[in-house]
Image (cartoon, rainbow, N blue to C red):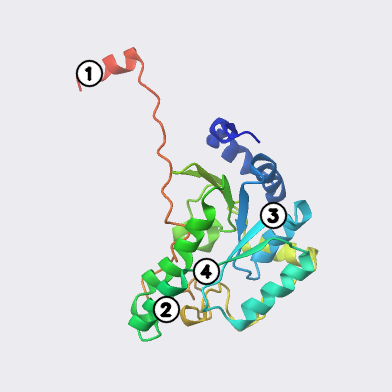
Amino acid sequence: MSIAMPKKINLDQLNERFEKTQPEEILRWAMDEFRPKIALSSSFQTESVVLLHMVSQIDPAIKILFLETGWHFKETLDFKNEIVKRLKLTNIVDLKTDPKKREAFNTKTGGKPYEVDPDYCCQINKVEPLDEALKGLDAWISGIRRSQSKTRKDIRIIEEYQGGIFKINPLANVTSGDLWWYLKEHNLPKHPLFDKGYLSIGCWPCTKPVQPGDDERSGRWAGKEKTECGIHTFMKPKPVKQEAETPAEKQEGSEI
């Protein structure tokens, strides 16, 4: 892929096409278009396994980014190791914050940064390490879906951000039911905490079981206004270039 290729991408056309396309085709397009400057981020939850399995069938050596915050459930780390071995994934990168910054903040907050300032806790343990890892990449594959929460209902399958990076959301219009069908069809395992009500799993201090009737991310930062860690909101969308008005259009509105 030449460096100039991303500039030729027509986002509107691609998004219209991919709305009726299987996630595997979207992934193949993205990996062919951007390889080797492409990576997938994964939290190694139950539904994460679907995307991990799909990419493993295309290229098990794709770079997979895991945010090692130091606060994960042991079950998550064990599940991660199981999936990596099972799918024969060979390029897992654990992202960690600067240890001095982490230790200073932990000390300042009495060892409970997630209670004192959860936003900054996510900032240094998730946002900053991911931001650094994305430098030099042309594309980032994410597993977020519109049906997960109100904050994600408007995501597009292909998004472009300032800095020249494209974000690929191949599961954007996929439902939880679709994912469970895929897991069953391919005999894939689920996270050991799922059956205990943990439908969306992050760091153990900030994750609780989901209550009946609530959306699947309601167990994250329960009781707080916080709904996102920031890794899907810190990047700014690239401004859409407006087409220049024709002389006739300018004349038509000149007296308004």
Of labels 4 and 3, earlier in sequence is 3
Q: At 40% from the left edge and 83% from the top edge, which residue is drawn?
A: 112
Looking at the rendered structure, the kind of residue marked 1 is Ser
Cα–Cα gap, marks 4 and 1: 56 Å
Cα–Cα gap, marks 2 and 3: 32 Å
Residue 239, located in which quarter of the rendered image?
top left
The residue positioned farthest toward the bottom in the image shown:
110
The answer to whether the residue labelled 2 contacts the one labelled 1, judged by CB atoms less than 8 Å apart, is: no
Identify the residue position indicated by label 4 in the image: 96
Of labels 1 and 3, earlier in sequence is 3
Q: Is residue 122 left or right of residue 6?
A: left
How many marks are shown on the rendered structure? Answer: 4
Of labels 2 and 3, earlier in sequence is 3
Q: At 75% from the left edge and 52% from the top edge, which residue is drawn?
A: 59
Residue 197 x, y percent position in the rendering: 58, 80
- Of 132 and 21, nearer the camera is 132
Other residues around mark 3 within 10 Å, as few (<14) / some (14–19) / many (≥20): many
Could you say which disc has been placed on residue 254 in the image? 1
Quadrant position of the C terminus in the picture: top left
